[in-house]
Amino acid sequence: MAHDDPPQSAHGRPTPATVLHRIAAGAGRAARVTHTEHLPPRTGRHADWPDQIRSEVVDAIRAAGIARPWEHQAQAARLALRGESVVVATGTASGKSLGYLAPVLSTLLTGSEAPNGRGATALYLAPTKALAADQRRAVAELAAPLGTAIRPAVYDGDTPFEEREWVRQYATYVLTNPDMLHRGILPGHPRWASFLRQLAYVVIDECHTYRGVFGSHVAQVLRRLRRVCARYGANPVFLLASATAADPAAAAGRLTGVSVTEITEDASPRGELVFALWEPPLTELSGERGAPVRRTATAESADLLTDLVVQGTRTVAFVRSRRAAELIALLAQDKLAAVDRSLPGRVGAYRGGYLPEERRAIERELHSGRLLGLASTTALELGVDISGLDAVLLAGYPGTRASLWQQAGRAGRAGQGALAVLIARDDPLDTFLVHHPEALFDRPVESTVLDPDNPYVLAPHLCAAAAELPLTEADLALFGPEAPDLIPQLEKRGLLRRRRDSWYWTRRERAADLTDIRGEGGRPIQVVEAATGRLLGTVDQSAAHATVHDGAVHLHQGRTYLVSHLDLDDNVALVEEADPPYSTMARDTTAITILGTETEQPWGEARLCFGSVEVTHQVVSYLRRKLITGEVLGETKLDLPPRTLRTRAVWWTLTDDQLEQARIHPEELAGALHAAEHASIGILPLFATCDRWDIGGVSFPLHPDTGLPTVFVYDGHPGGAGFAERAYRTARAWLTATREAIAACECDFGCPSCIQSPKCGNGNDPLDKLAAVRLLDCLLAAGTGDG
């Protein structure tokens, strides 16, 4: 029996419902859609620009096709012109950038009439180079009618050295990233004196991305910026833009250290969004310990991307890893070649680690529409203008609801309807979400978690600040309450020296090089083709042991390589082109020592604790898995050095009496604790702005420091990132959701959808699903309050 497609939209393009109907029409596919959410279109509400906006700027905005601003844009401009720092936290494609650009351009235009021609400047910070480059294009186009009064320029690691001096001397609107501010601009502030003396505005785009350790570092970089500006007599206004966030004013205040007013009511129009939750089917294969295996989100995404491209539907598939981006593009190209030889070239991959010229070429092809389909990491999640997209695939939950809506909002940016599809990975959180849509659609986005007072973050920034300008007692309040206690430690280590009433940096090397603000630790590993010496890209040092170890499969631009040797001394991974029928996944072991308990509470006889720990990791082997199916082909031992991490953790203990009440037999205990640990890690991203790769865990039937059965969940960053503390504060809700996720899974004995972990160093053994539920029931029955 034939089925008619739903109707076309008024502009002749298929409606989002039509597109979903078509891709779900294949054999067995309809059952994979577990929920469809329809977000209706919304009409916009206009306002007038404040009178203080220069008429030339208003005319330029009109020439760009914008007759009047939305209410939230006008409100942001009004506050900015009054000298108030403001965060605009409205939806994707709501025109946040125009809300801050109008007052910035107006102020710069007035400044250009000053005697020196540069009476005001503005600094724009983006978390990625691609976003900064995209915004420079947008500013240049908007400001073109204003002549040479507005001089925008990008200043980042890709800026040729011969251009940098021009930027310092003549640019009025400098677009950069926190990394360049940390390593280049602030250490060289005397060369930027003219620019900084006139700095009127600091624009911080996509500020919700500054979370965890990265956000904590950026918070201290911004405090250093404020201090240097004050030295030159400037007190810039901060203008922040964010995806919809919980309590954006408080988060922006923690980030900048200044009082910030929030604007959260979105007055822009929105096209219809159809959001589908999609669960890949179970396969006939068995995984570790005989567990059922679902088809991978990678394979499912490649199929859907193929179908959408064949239909002419412009689509981006967002993925969680660089490898997955390459693999989805490769699989889709192979499938498209069988349909039409012209189509494979219209699909590509985009990720970090590419060389600058490769990134720019892909961005141009996406802008021009030559690329119909793209598999991308979060490098394209942010506000890069990719208007004209019809659909977005999310290959796995991106870790936070803020990122989910940010990625989904990349389609339909021109006002047309859009389709978003979240494709569940075989993972406890993804499985929970596709069967509990209310957890996505009926809850606000998370609070942004960052901790600028983390001593591992703060200490190197105090050194960097002292190198920029000698530190005084009066400066310390700017850097937070922990700063006075850290200064004596830095003196003892010979990093700072006191002379009269100030502290000075004592070393010859650059203080800014003490820390990597993205929390990646150390110089990146260069990936080099052994036969030619050609640099293919880079890998973060913190990820090198697990991703470019000897024998690892490495994907780059659709080509597959095998790592022949990882040289940790020279920071080089040598690779050779190959075509193995498998992927690789590293395995590691973990030990943990409690350094100190900061706070704890009794849950009956159980105890819930939060404090400092030392974690020791060692990558010991890697698995070879069949492509597509994930079937394990074998395991190979590795000889890599251990890595230690001092961080923060939440942990809980149970007593023998409680285990007896829960009917946990001694032979079940290790499996119950291990299963509860895995599931709690998988569920924590619902309660903190992290994903499971930001956190780790380990469980012990008898831990030497507690003398009891203990489960730890810890931040995967030196000094902590705030995630474990958030887990401690929301422990009852977090562990209740963990228990529900395990109990609700349809498997009998445990699978990747509930208690198996993709990064388990013990091969997901032992695990006991039923005992884990009883264990958590006992713990939650003992707990009181909110945790």
Image (spheres, rainbow, N blue to C red):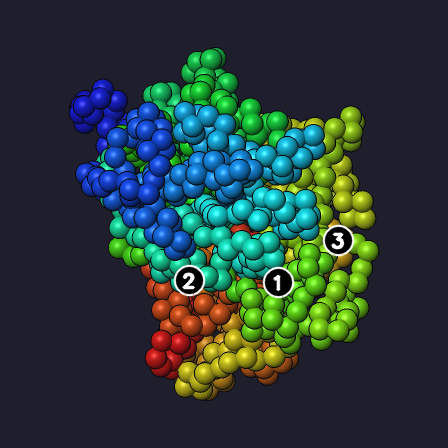
Q: Are marks 3 and 2 in contact (CB under 8 Å)?
A: no
Residue 83 position (above or below residue 658): above
Q: Quadrant of the N terminus?
A: top left
At a point 41% along the width and 86% down the height, the residue shown is 604
Dot 3: element: loop
Labelled disc at residue 457: 1
Counting every numbered tag in the picture gives: 3
Q: Position of residue 245 (x, y in %)?
A: 36, 54
Q: Are marks 3 and 1 in contact (CB under 8 Å)?
A: no
N-term-proximal mark, 3 vs 1: 1
Between 773 and 245, the one lying in front of the other is: 245
Q: Alpha-carbon neighbours of circle 2 within 10 Å: few (<14), some, or many (≥20)? A: some
Between 326 and 368, the one lying in front of the other is: 368
At a point 65% along the width and 31% down the height, the residue shown is 163
Dot 1: element: helix
Q: Quadrant of residue 405?
A: top left
Dot 2: element: loop
Q: Position of residue 686 (x, y in %)?
A: 39, 59
Between 718 and 584, the one lying in front of the other is: 718
Residue 655 position (above or below residue 133): below
Q: Position of residue 550 (x, y in %)?
A: 73, 43
At a point 33% along the width and 43% down the height, the residue shown is 52
Residue, disc 3: 510
Q: Alpha-carbon neighbours of circle 1 within 10 Å: few (<14), some, or many (≥20)? A: many
Looking at the rendered structure, the kind of residue marked 2 is Ser
Between 601 and 43, the one lying in front of the other is: 43
Q: CA distance from mark 2 to mark 1?
A: 22 Å
Looking at the rendered structure, the kind of residue marked 1 is Val
Q: CA distance from mark 3 to mark 2?
A: 32 Å
Q: CA distance from mark 3 to mark 1?
A: 17 Å
Labelled disc at residue 259: 2
